[in-house]
Amino acid sequence: MTEDLLLPFIPISLFLCITYAIKAVVDARVRKQLVGSNASEDLVRSIVEADERRRRHASLRWGVTLVALAVGFGLIEAFDWRDVNPGVIAVLLGAAGIGNLAYFAMSRRLPDAR
């Protein structure tokens, strides 16, 4: 029965992996063309720095959100809630929301790396 539930996720995960691989190749090609097009050094540097900052913020966001979700799962385990009901789902959604809000507050305080 578990195999039947996981079967639809195989093509979805395959699609996501292929999409990510295509995005990585396209990004690398655009960077190569940008460097090869004799664009100004300041333009190339600003684009690379903005991309690095975006990646760093994405890592921070996922980290904070996953820690908040871990706290939510810990609360569910601490209160010994075993059934999936609206209250348990609300705890997890609330934890994800708090994680995203915490990321927003942290990102506003991060210095601009220029």
Image: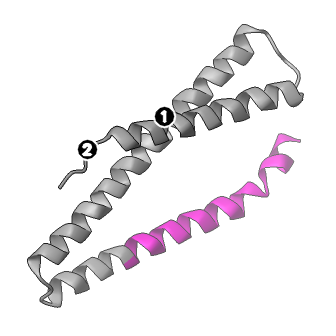
Q: Is residue 64 above or below residue 9?
A: above
Residue at x 39% of width, y 79% of height? 26
The location of residue 32, given as percent across then percent down, is 23, 81
Q: Check residue 30 for magenta coloring.
A: no
The numbered mark, 2 or 1, whose residue comes first in the sequence reads 1
Q: Is residue 16 above or below residue 66?
A: below
User: Please, which residue is most extreme toward the bottom here?
Assistant: 37
The mark closer to the camera, 2 or 1, is: 2
- Image position of 94 (left or right of 63): right
Residue at x 70% of width, y 58% of height? 10
- The secondary element bearing badge 2 is classed as loop
Q: Is residue 9 above or below residue 93?
A: below
Q: Check residue 24 for magenta coloring.
A: yes
Mark-to-mark CA distance, 2 and 1 = 18 Å
Badge 1: residue crowd in 10 Å (few <14, some 14–19, many ≥20): many
The location of residue 65, given as percent across then percent down, is 54, 36
- Image position of 110 (left or right of 101): left
> Considering depth in this image, is 28 or 15 the residue closer to the camera?
28
Disc 1: which residue: 64
Disc 2: which residue: 111
Q: Give, as a three-letter code, the residue at label 1.
A: Val
Residue at x 78% of width, y 30% of height? 90
What segment carries the magenta color? Answer: 1-26
Q: Main secondary structure of the magenta part?
A: helix
The number of discs equals 2
